[in-house]
Image: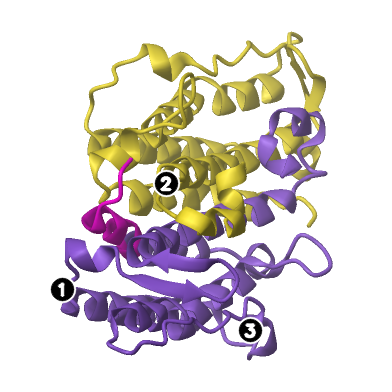
Chain colours: A purple, B yellow
Amino acid sequence: MEFSLKQTIEILETTPFVIESYLLRLSKEWVENNEGKDTWSPYDVLGHLIHGEKTDWMVRINIILSESENKLFKSFDRFAQLKEEQNLPIEKIILEFKNLRKKNLAELASLHITERDLSRIGVHPELGEVSLQQLLATWAVHDLGHIAQISRVMAKQYVKEVGPWEAYLGILKK
Amino acid sequence: MEFSLKQTIEILETTPFVIESYLLRLSKEWVENNEGKDTWSPYDVLGHLIHGEKTDWMVRINIILSESENKLFKSFDRFAQLKEEQNLPIEKIILEFKNLRKKNLAELASLHITERDLSRIGVHPELGEVSLQQLLATWAVHDLGHIAQISRVMAKQYVKEVGPWEAYLGILKK
């Protein structure tokens, strides 16, 4: 599939609804259990997505599109959410994510990104030069990856409970 | 996490809403592209889930709980959906899945499964003896696995588009 701004935004718009339908009605254990020491629960994943909305995606898009000559991105703190308030109810953090994503997509729309803008460049602190198009594609794939992670973390809670079926359930081996 | 009938049903109830929020608003390419020859698109995955609702889960639960001495399950055709009508619009097959799952969960509730029932046994054609509890846990994990698969298949559509970020996106390596 080739990059399309419209189709990328479809994914970015969809994610908050997927997260909400996934996590809003589940009991605490599904949402707060993780895969073991130093791994993330679905709750932690959502905190990470929120942190990205606040500090990463739009900030980097604005660096790429700015007139400034300094195109270097700051490193993204992938563990920031683990330092934050962990006791907010899931409804609150789902709502926060929905609102932040909505605001960011409104800002994105207001930039009226052109074909030419898509090839503009920023500098990632580790990866080097990246284009706006690559950043937008990554934002969408990052969402999809974390929805898969939420699924895997919850599936693993039942690794012992499925008995011999474990052999058929690839998700439990990941 | 230990098995709980209530918490298992939470996942089974949630899945149709996750699938709906995920696939209802996306354009055809996200829903119908796959990972390459002999792999499944999100559309195919949904057909597989529907086939399971029709022929697998409740049928096997009823075999386990029946008075009959023959506890052998039929093999599940994991490729059945590929032989079926492939041209129904996604809205129709999402609705079909929602309705089938609702009907099956109503039937499950009507069985008033007890602690003792959970240890009753059926015979899987390849895995041998399995308990009702293991079957119910597997039904839920199977859902979660296929939501992860849908995420992965869609993510892979952009494997080239993310450029150097591919290195950081574990979902693209699965």
Categorize mark 2 by other alpha carbons within 10 Å: few (<14), some (14-19), many (20+): many
Count of numbered circles in the view: 3
For the residue marked with disc 3, what is the amino acid? Answer: Ala
Disc 1 and disc 2: Cα gap in Å? 35 Å
**Range drawn in magenta:** A1-13
| Chain containing mark 3 | A
The structure residue drawn at horizontal position 75% and vertical position 66%, both measured from the top left corner, is A39
Q: Residues within 10 Å of mark 1 (few under 14, many from 20)?
A: few
Is circle 3 on the same chain as circle 1? Answer: yes
For discs 3 and 2, the disc positioned in front in the rendered view: 3
| Camera-nearest label, 1 or 2 | 1
Q: Position of residue A7 (x, y in %)?
A: 26, 53
Left or right of residue B123: residue A132: left
The amino acid pointed to by label 1 is His
- In percent of the image, x 64 and y 27: which residue is there? B61
Label 2 element class: helix
Where is mark 3, residue-wise?
A: A80
- Left or right? Give the position of B172 relative to A61: right
**Where is residue B6, by image quadrant?**
bottom right
> Can you give x and y, in whole percent of width and height, for residue B87 in the image?
23, 23
Position above or below: A16 against A155: below
Placement of the C terminus of chain B among the 4 image quadrants: top right
| Residue displayed at 57% across by 78% down | A47
Q: Earlier in the sequence, mark 3 or mark 1?
A: 3
Q: Which residue is mark 1?
A: A112
Label placed on residue B166: none
